[in-house]
Image (cartoon, grey):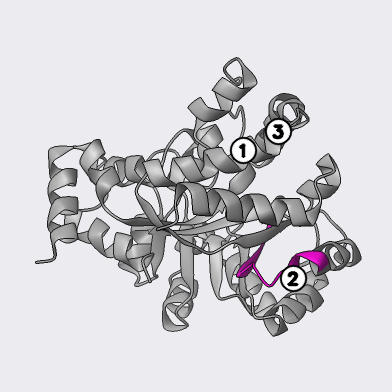
Amino acid sequence: MPENKVSFLKALQDGNLKAIRLVPKSDLHNHCMLGGKASVINRFYGEKLKPFKAEKMGIEPLNNWITEVYKPYMERPGAFEKAVEAAFIQATYDGIKVLEMSMDGFFGTLFNVPVERMVNVLKQYHALLVPGIDFRPELGFPKTLPLRTILKLIEPFLAFDYFRSIDLYDDENAQPLENFRELYRFTRKAGLKLKAHAGEFGDADSVRKAVEVLELDEVQHGIGAASSPEVMRWLANNGIRLNVCPESNIRLRRVKSYKTHPIRILFDHGVKVTVNTDDALLFRAGVSEQFLRLYRSGLFSPAELETIRLNGMS
């Protein structure tokens, strides 16, 4: 039996979080500007950021926290660099060896950060802090932006031939998916892997529609699919991986607890799932903590969690 498998299974059974962190893992759903280790951000800020707590289900509480708490911090000189540094520190602390971390393509416009600076900072901290990580930089855009705005924003990023995938996030119902078909066909031709948020709060049909309309390779979240055996069978048959974020789903009140999380249903229906952080700065849980919580809740056995761990390592 491979050493990593033995150590991961034993670490789970022993409840040894430090040992779990030492086992190679992936994080394939990670928003860079919100993905940093909180202690690094707090030291730079000079005080602890106000903890995130959602009073109701949905993306609105998260967006409110960003506007009220995090945006003033990001307006400080050097805050962009520190956020990127903190994200890579969080990844290495968590034992991440495959990292698909998304850079907000609208961030530079909001905070006057040129594209060249954004790319150079990502390259700098990757090389400086975690050169051994298989880093696959991703571009993300909010679904609230008009198509023409995104097409204009994305061109200078693609000129660097650096980013490997694209993601759409924010309010799932902000616009019809058909509005983004041109963007996804364009980025497919540019060689990017196609991902998008779907089924975070939406139903199973919304997940299948997102895959079909945008011709997605993977879905970020996708847990709404658990309500339909037909859609889960379709996802499994088509090899569509769901990059699930259990802590995020619980903290945003989409799911009540680990014990009731639909990742179990998806797994049982043959859907390929992974465990990811989403926004570690807000939710204060790495991939390692989530694996341990999934085990302690009784939702999965160590061997099943090993399968999920390996799902993200390819």
Q: Nearer the viewer, residue 244 or 165?
A: 165
Q: What secondary structure is marked by label 1?
A: helix
**Quick one: 101 or 197, which is closer to the camera?**
101
Position in image of residue 298 (x %, y %): 23, 45
Is residue 51 visible from the viewing direction of this image? Answer: no
Q: CA distance from mark 1 to mark 2?
A: 22 Å
The CA distance from mark 3 to mark 1 is 9 Å
What's the amino acid at mark 3?
Gly
Q: Position of residue 108 (x, y in %)?
A: 80, 48
313 sits to left or right of 8: right
Query: Which percent across, then down, holds residue 93?
Result: 38, 41
Q: Earlier in the sequence, mark 3 or mark 1?
A: 3
Q: Which residues are magenta?
A: 156-168
Frontmost of labels 2 and 3 is 3
* Labels 2 and 3: the sequence-earlier one: 3
Label 1 belongs to which residue?
A: 83
Q: Quadrant of the N terminus?
A: bottom left
Residue 78, labelled with which disc?
Answer: 3
Image location (x, y in percent) of residue 31: 59, 49
Q: Which residue is mark 2?
A: 158
